[in-house]
Image (tube, rainbow, N blue to C red):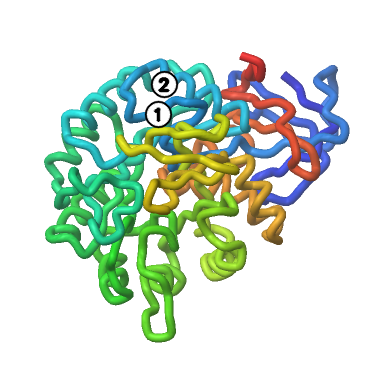
Amino acid sequence: MLLKNATVICDDFIPHRMDLRIERNRIAELAPQISGNGVDLTGLWILPGLVDIHVHGIAGADFCGAAPSALETMSCALAKHGVTAFCPASMTLPLDALEDAFAVCGEYRGKEGGAQILGVRMEGPFLSAKKKGAQDEAFLRLPSYSEFSRLNALCPVCVVDCAPELEGAFAFARQAEKVCTVSIAHTAADYDTAKSALASGFSHATHMYNAMESISARVPGVPTAFFESGTATAEMICDGFHVHPALIRQAQRMLGKNRFVAISDAMQAADMPDGTYDLGGQPATVSGGKAQFADGTIAGGTGNMFSNLQVLRDIGILLEEAVRACTINPARVVGADAEIGSIALGKRADLLITDEKLRRVYDVYLRGNKFCMGG
């Protein structure tokens, strides 16, 4: 497969006029001109496939529904938006319900018709009741490495979320970090606790600014601990609803080009009309694309990583840094950056074909094969 005359965002994340050759599902050659007939992409851009490490559902499907058909719906619906790899995210549920969802995912993984499942994003149940957000307080519990291990054995966990102020959280994080990334999430922790957590196994922040204490003059909070860290990463829901654009710009500047991560946090209402949808066993009403519970609490997202990318550009984030936030940075958080997340020789040919203004997904290549957008 030869793609010709495109503008390619290579692994330096700077646009280059390039031809790109795919062999055996890999990027085999990149050059200004490669001889041979191929697909003419004049006027179009090739980006790395987008990577979503926090997505609960889309197109009416939900990971916690524990059905292969739901995972297939998610895989294909995400691919239509240029997402080539993802981590389906759990909610706070009873252990037996989580075991069912993880077991189904473990069995289905590797059979995807669209975007690849990298592993599970375990968002709960080890979270704070004070900052539960969309999580069901009835099923919140203290961190348990044995419970984590049982679920990880059913399907690999890429990121496990935990409120660091909970009893046993630091000991849990020191064990779990040997298996996956441990993320500060749904937390009432203060700045000092967050700083200690970053020295005790935690290395990531879940949907920063959401479900955590706000920053004020004498309350630096969790975000400031991450801004001061030279290595910790942080994700944000860049949909225009969850976080004000000024705070997104601030976080991106403070974290820098390599530590800022975009996520969708999408729920089953994504790609669906306004109405009432389920999230973690609770009804959320979507109006104008914004999902809320009856008490006004904002629920999950209804966008996707391509719309995130558009928002980042629209609010003034540089192209290079916006693309990094949606590709290589999330891939790095889950340890998949050697295979995916950028366009480089030898890497898997997961590609998004779009236009210069990022207004439309024209084509998607998954593991070197063109995805049927109408399928």
Please report the residue visible at 83 percent of the width from the left and 28 percent of the height from the top. 41
- In the drawing, what numbered circle is on residue 70? 2
Label whose residue precedes the other's in the sequence (1 or 2): 1
Question: Is residue 341 something that shows in the picture?
Answer: no
Q: Amino acid at mark 1?
A: Asp
Is 105 left, or right, of 305 in this rendering?
left
Question: Is residue 220 something that shows in the picture?
Answer: yes
Q: Is residue 163 above or below residue 11?
A: below
Please report the residue visible at 76 percent of the width from the left and 22 percent of the height from the top. 2
Q: Is residue 175 above or below residue 102?
A: below
Please report the residue visible at 64 percent of the width from the left and 48 percent of the height from the top. 323
- Asked if marks 1 and 2 touch (Cβ < 8 Å), the reply is yes
- In the drawing, what numbered circle is on residue 62? 1
Please report the residue visible at 55 percent of the width from the left and 67 percent of the height from the top. 247
Closest to the observer, 190 or 85: 190
Which element type, helix, strand or loop, lies under badge 1? Answer: strand
Q: Quadrant of the C terminus?
A: top right
| Farthest-out residue, right | 42
Q: Is residue 223 above or below residue 241?
A: below
Residue 109 image position (x, y, % from top left): 38, 22
| Farthest-out residue, bottom | 218
